[in-house]
Image: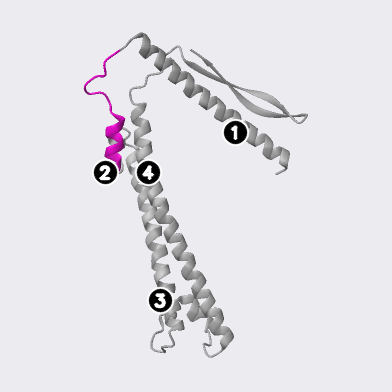
Amino acid sequence: MTGKGFLKIILIIIQLLLVSTLRAQLIEADTIQSAQEIPEKEAPNAHSPRKATIYSAVLPGLGQVYNKKYWKVPVIYLGFGTIAYFINWNNDNYQLFRRGYFDLIDDDPETQGYLEIEAVRRNNYDLNNPTHFNNLRTALMRQKDYFRRNRDLLFIGMVGFYGLNIIDASVDAHFFDFDISDDLTLKWEPSLMQIDNNFVYCINFRFSF
């Protein structure tokens, strides 16, 4: 992709982000104005974003149930299950290569954990050959570090996914009772934007309220 093409994509994305921000500001301003004109007391059983946040923090998916977004619960647990599966898979491989690596360098002929690795058996390394020994040691160390890094990154991903589950519940709860008026409409239409004497297609959004 050329520099101009990349710039065009960036500008289109910025336009969409600005439109999205404008929409949020319009909704917020309209809501604040309505609240000032017609002050109302919060209902005793009003939907609580705080409760949704706490529920999902205590048990992932519970906040989504509270928000009546039941379809999100299996998605959340599918995500956790997938991450957990690959954490376990990478950890098993890390332990396998770690054991093989340390068995190789401990100078004890009785410890041969590296022979549990199929690739090692298949290549028939001659450990009496210094070149073969060094190649095997380097390969085991690299694989050991590779699977450990993947496992650790997946742990971080698990924490991030847990946080995303909480944020999702909180955001949904904030908009649970939100009702867009019939007077608020969104229209979009294709248009052309001039960039560096070239025209590119983009999308224009129009709000009326």
Which quadrant, please, contains the N terminus? top right
User: Which amino acid does the dot numbered 1 rest on?
Assistant: Ile
Q: Quadrant of residue 115?
A: bottom left
- Whether tag 3 and tag 2 are in contact, CB under 8 A, the answer is no
Residue 67 seen in this snapshot? no
**Image coords of residue 80 (percent x, y):** 36, 50
Q: CA distance from mark 2 to mark 4?
A: 11 Å
The numbered mark, 1 or 3, whose residue comes first in the sequence reads 1
Residue behind mark 2 = 58
* Identity of the residue drawn at 42% across and 68% down: 93
Q: Secondary structure at mark 4?
A: helix
User: Which amino acid does the dot numbered 4 rest on?
Assistant: Gly
- Whether tag 2 and tag 4 are in contact, CB under 8 A, the answer is no
Q: CA distance from mark 4 to mark 1?
A: 26 Å
As displayed, is residue 85 above or below residue 73?
Answer: below
User: Which amino acid does the dot numbered 2 rest on?
Assistant: Val
Q: Quadrant of residue 57?
A: top left
**Image coords of residue 44 (percent x, y):** 21, 21
Q: Nearer the viewer, residue 75 or 9?
A: 9
As displayed, is residue 183 above or below residue 137?
Answer: above
